[in-house]
Amino acid sequence: MRHEWKFPFHILFHPFDGFWDLKYENKGRMRVAMVILLLLVVATSLMKQFSGFLVNYYDPRYLNTLDDLMFTVLPFFLFCVANWSVTTLMEGEGKFREIVIATAYALLPMILINIPLTFISRFLTNEETAFYWMLNSFGALWFLWLLFVGNMTIHQYSVTKAVFTLVLTVIAMGIIVFLGALALTICMDMYWFVYDIYRELIFR
Amino acid sequence: MRTKKSLVLAAIMSLLVLTAAPAAQAATPYEAYTYNYYADAVALPAPFLPERIVNGASLGVGDFKLPNDFYVTKDGTVYILDSGNNRIIVADEHWNVIRIIDGFDNNGTPDTFGNPNGIFVSETGKIYVADTDKRRVVVLDGDGSLVKIVENPQSEVLPDNFEFVPLKVTADRAERIFVVARGVYEGIMQFNDTGEFLGYVGTIKVQPSLADRIWRWLATDEQKSQMVLFIPTEFSSVDIDDKGFVYATNIDVGSTETIKRINPLGKDVIKRFGHYPNVGDIRYRSYGRDSGPSKLTDIKYIGDGMYIVLDSNRARIFAYNDEGELLYAFGGRGTQLGVFNTPVSVEWQKGKLLVLDRGKNNIVIFRPTKFGKLVHEATALHYNGNTADSVELWKEVLRLNSNYDIAYLGIGKSLLMAKQNKEAMEYFKLGMSRKYYSLAFKRYRREVMQEHFGAFMTTVVVLIAAFAAFRIARRVRPGRSAGHEA
């Protein structure tokens, strides 16, 4: 029980071992992954709301936690679905569940860095904000590194293939968004078509 | 907190006042605004109200005919360049005509103007006229007698077939003449007091757009030779301040440097420290009616670092302070009093704003409102270093309009001077100035650190000691238990 909460922290510093254990020792937990995802939403919201004036470029009139939720959770699952679609075709060994858990665990550094950073940013002067942006990008790079290692380990890919599939995943995400928008427009058109016929009938 | 409360209260009060007297609101046919940090146009109380118009008939000199320019001296005397009638009408502060200059004695032969475009009057009372169609700059004495004529400039840098077509003119205390001429892209032409051509000042940089560059890169040499050259735009107007710095505008679409302040060395030294560059409108439609960036066709330095520019595209007036922050903007096209047909020139007559409208052949006189007066007074105090005195005025401005960023900055700067760093931080935050906020915060942080240095260090030492003790205890205990087990 305690171990499953400690495990993501183990992955932070030992990504190769960690993701191996996640896959073959079955150490990943879906609920931990979901909690991490939720914490990321909280961290993003906190950051937009409470980071210091000097680094906070968000327009306070348009801050919306529900938007943060949507724009964190949706891209997350979009990535997972796209990654799953690509890797299934490319002999990846990862299951969808493993992809979700690995991706979520990879997000942990962003939370661990951004929450304290939000607090620290309130005590920085203009010259010191460079540190803020450095740490901020450091968190993002750490996330990308974990994502890459996770992807490689879960699907049992070589380095080049892992990079290649990640690029393909991004392209697939674009395709999914495009198809989704297309489907939505067609559905809307159909809806309005039926609605118009209905109106024609009642106003006849 | 108290100031915040009073601000909210002021906002509520202002709402009450507005609903109580809607007539005052409807008095202007235009809406005044400024741009906030987020590039939104924020409504302002009107800084100026149209008072009346002055035309040829009301002056009793017969209608103006397409007047191109006018000039108001410090003592309020107005010189109207009635271009279509080729005359200069001189009127005093109260619009009583003093004299009409419709010609001058050119070394024995009577001479007249030919569709002059620009006029300037120096502090010593000399009248400079850019006599466009006659290709010369005429300098007259206050009574209308000829001083000198500047024409046909000779220089190595000028091409052989150069034609001198002056449009706008200004002069400094040393009687150096600055001329904006048609077809001259190198800058503003500068002449010395004897009328000798000295050279150009304030050259406009040419920046071809990315599309232009790609297009050029794709073109063959033959096509390139047929392409239009990338030549800079011409200047559109000039004015001069008390220190001899030339203010100039140009119509350079896409540039952020359409307003220049040129120092005696010919370099542009204007400050562009506002949230957005001082180019007139920063938000506009790309296509259709009233679209495109502002075309600044006239500039007037009104003292204390402030200058006013005229946008001929949307017939609007923009006022900036010395930092390049937009104080207010207003104006528009129309037929009512206070809006324009073809505004060509702005002037400043002892606190009143005058706009010459070539289309309507009249001059509109605007008088400042309480808001406009306060903004000008506070800006002037601030410019002259009396920041402490300006605070009360800025607070009054905020009472009238709590969305006025410059007022928050003004109060903030004064608080910063008075070493009230924490309060200053609050105001800089409201004024959205990260630069000054950082400065105030740095001082405040140092203050707090110095005050609480003892407590801070004690905490750190105690924490380190506790951590060390914890580590030692942890190392000792397993050893003991291991011993027991063995």
Image (cartoon, coloured by chain):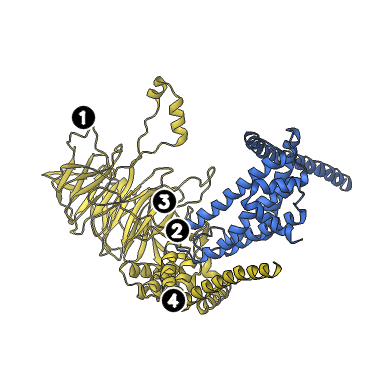
Chain colours: A blue, B yellow
Identify the residue under disc 4.
Answer: B453
Three-letter code, disc 4: Phe
* Residue B279 image label: 3
The residue where tag 1 is placed is: B160
Please name the residue shown 39% across and 71% down the image: B416
* Of labels 2 and 3, the one closer to you: 3
Q: Secondary structure at mark 1?
A: loop
Mark number, residue B472? none
Report the disc number at residue B329: 2
Tell me: residue B451, above or below residue B207: below
Disc 3 on helix, strand or loop? Answer: loop
Is residue A158 visible to us here? yes
Sequence-first disc among 3 and 1: 1
Residue closest to the far top: B222
Q: CA distance from mark 1 to mark 2?
A: 44 Å
Residue contact between numbered discs 3 and 4, judged by CB atoms under 8 Å: no
- Give the residue displayed 17% in from the left and 59% down from the top: B124
Q: Position of residue A202 (x, y in %)?
A: 88, 48
